[in-house]
């Protein structure tokens, strides 16, 4: 009970810190009129987004086998990559169409805003959750049931040497076919959720907002590249997480879904509400599914004689 209350306090503190950082970064870069400062409704929405961000970032930090700068760098890359990089590079692609929405002068500021927020918030989050320094180990000798055995525990959990962490360990051939499957799955998800989730939810607003939009001929190779970037973001999370493989799957899926999609909860003057909420549902559902696919395929070696539990302490 006490642990749960203390965790809620930490999440609340992180929410306030992140809310302040969004405001400071926006003011510093002159982005105060981009929608985040449009009124009380936008402020409350941003506060809710900051809570969701704090929540989904806290989970992999708490359950991480890593600590210190290794953990900070991992969370920073995932935070910035999912929140800013992967969304804004798509804006660059469609800049000719979206020039009336996001100007060429504003786009670098959006990249920099995400960089500032992630760089400042990540170490504070790791610090508040007590993962800057490695917690001390307890050494237990058990000799009751036979030969003496040494068990090493930290925080009540038994530890395995890092070299016994078998996640992501697989032959090159298996890496190649799994990456090919992941890219194909992402392209299918991109098309399917766009056609059968976003467009129906957007309704007539889609044809009005995206009138004249022409997909470039290289859109699918570009999306394949984005799929590989998503994989790169997932790999350190898969590697560092404690527990069963599904914990890594849950962490990656929530990070992908919330860090990219939650900002669409904030009212924006340049995007109609119906378009914004349709995109929100599309991104949350598709990214959540894609995160699970990545972790399921990559968390272990699939094949004869492979370990099937995927459980890492």
Image (cartoon, rainbow, N blue to C red):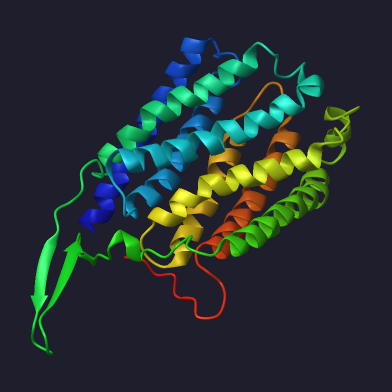
Q: Measured from the top left, where is residue 198 in percent x and y?
A: 77, 45
Q: Is residue 115 left or right of residue 229?
A: left
Q: Nearer the viewer, residue 52 or 177?
A: 177
Residue 266 percent across, percent down from the top left: 59, 31
In the shown orientation, is residue 161 left or right of residue 295? left
View extreme (bottom): residue: 146
Would you place residue 94 above or below residue 132 in this image? above
Where is residue 48 drawn, in percent x and y? 48, 37
Residue at 65% x, 52% y: name it.
285
Which residue lies at the image location 47% right of the left edge and 37% below the top edge?
Answer: 77
At 11% from the left and 86% from the top, the residue drawn is 147
The residue drawn where x is 68% and y is 41% is: 225
Q: How many marks?
A: 0
Which quarter of the figure has residue 19? Answer: top left
249 to 77, vertically: above or below: below
In the rendered image, the quadrant that contains the C terminus is bottom left
Specify the quadrant that holds the N terminus.
bottom left
């Amino acid at each position: 009970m006490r642990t749960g209350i203390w965790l809620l306090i930490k999440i609340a503190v992180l929410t306030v810190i992140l809310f302040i950082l969004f405001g400071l970064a926006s003011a510093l870069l002159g982005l105060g009129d981009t929608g985040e400062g449009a009124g009380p409704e936008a402020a409350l929405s941003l506060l809710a987004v900051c809570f969701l961000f704090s929540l989904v970032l806290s989970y992999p930090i708490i359950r991480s086998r890593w600590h210190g700068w290794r953990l900070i760098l991992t969370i920073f890359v995932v935070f910035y990559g999912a929140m800013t990089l992967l969304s804004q590079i798509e804006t660059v692609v469609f800049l000719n169409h979206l020039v009336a929405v996001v100007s060429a002068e504003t786009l670098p500021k959006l990249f920099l805003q995400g960089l500032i927020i992630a760089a400042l918030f990540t170490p504070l989050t790791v610090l508040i959750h007590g993962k800057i320094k490695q917690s001390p180990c307890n050494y237990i000798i058990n000799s009751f049931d036979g030969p003496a055995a040494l068990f090493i525990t930290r925080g009540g959990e038994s530890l395995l040497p890092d070299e016994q962490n078998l996640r992501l360990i697989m032959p090159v051939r298996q890496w190649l076919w799994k990456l090919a499957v992941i890219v194909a799955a992402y392209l299918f998800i991109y098309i399917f959720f766009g056609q059968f989730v976003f467009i129906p939810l957007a309704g007539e607003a889609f044809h009005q907002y995206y009138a004249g939009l022409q997909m470039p001929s290289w859109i699918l190779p570009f999306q394949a590249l984005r799929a590989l970037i998503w994989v790169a973001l997932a790999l350190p999370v898969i590697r560092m997480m404690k527990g069963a493989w599904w914990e890594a799957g849950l962490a990656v899926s929530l990070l992908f879904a919330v860090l990219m999609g939650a900002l669409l909860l904030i009212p924006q003057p340049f995007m109609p509400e119906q378009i914004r909420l349709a995109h929100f549902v599309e991104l949350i559902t598709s990214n959540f599914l894609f995160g699970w696919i990545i972790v399921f395929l990559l968390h272990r070696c699939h094949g004869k004689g492979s370990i099937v539990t995927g459980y890492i302490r």
